[in-house]
Amino acid sequence: MNGVAIAFCLMPLLAPEAIFQQAASVPAQGELKAGPVPENLAANKRTAKPSKHADRILNINFGSAPVNSPPRGVIGGPGDVWTLVDVRETDKLALPMANGRPTDVVLKLSENDGEWGIPGPADVYHAYLYHNCRCVDLSVTLSYLPAGIYEAYIFAHGDAPDQNAAIEIQSGGTTYTGQKTLNDGTHRYRDREYEAGNQYVKYTIEVKNGSPVVITSKHDGSTLSMFNAIQLKRLRVK
């Protein structure tokens, strides 16, 4: 990382929150096994309602929860729920959908011990997790996703032009590969106007019953592997 990048990066990451809150009035839609809205989700009322397809969206962000801007990814809206995975955490159970309803989905993140931030709003893209060893590629395993076709949006970039990632997804015996985040020698990756091939990559994948989804962030331009955020949307099948 050059001196310019370091000067921008040496800012404290803002205090993480365990999960974003939202009102408990959204009915379960049957896309995933749902139970009562947990008390910690119902406690805080959001001014924004969950987005139209929040019952089919799963949101995950890494390192730090947004605090000075509403949660916003490529899909969904500012009233949607996100699950936070903090540094050194490796397991999350019963991930909620974006409408706040809990599911059977289990997340496992490989060992990690580093957290850093990209200058700009403290949004879902701001913080990222990595491993100081620089000898491992981080991976996320999602188990118990219902079968179906999903759009997968993976945010993965560190705060240097060459700290991009090549994203690979394994699901149902198929490997999806070939998509990378930006590595063009500029700081355009800091832009908050999200576009595929810059801050994130997009795949359309098939999830099969009983088969976990494994998402790997492979270091590409540098020795760093990272995750900033993940969004999954199950496409409605007619």
Image (cartoon, rainbow, N blue to C red):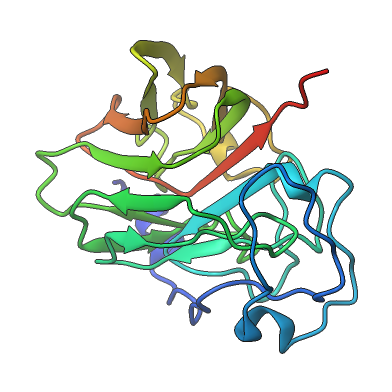
Q: Quadrant of residue 191?
A: top right
State left or right for residue 141 relative to residue 44: left
- Identified at 34% across, 55% down, the residue is 129
User: How far across and how far down the image is residue 164, in percent?
Assistant: 39, 32
User: How far across and how far down the image is residue 151, in percent?
Assistant: 63, 26
Q: Quadrant of residue 99?
A: bottom right
The answer to whether any part of residue 225 appears in the image is no
- Identified at 45% across, 39% down, the residue is 156
- Identified at 40% across, 52% down, the residue is 106
Above/below status of 224 relative to 82: above
- Identified at 39% across, 18% down, the residue is 172
> In this view of the protein, which residue sits in the foreground, 36 or 52?
36
User: How far across and how far down the image is residue 213, in percent?
Assistant: 39, 31
The answer to whether any part of residue 62 appears in the image is yes
State left or right for residue 55 relative to residue 203: right
Above/below status of 195 relative to 94: above
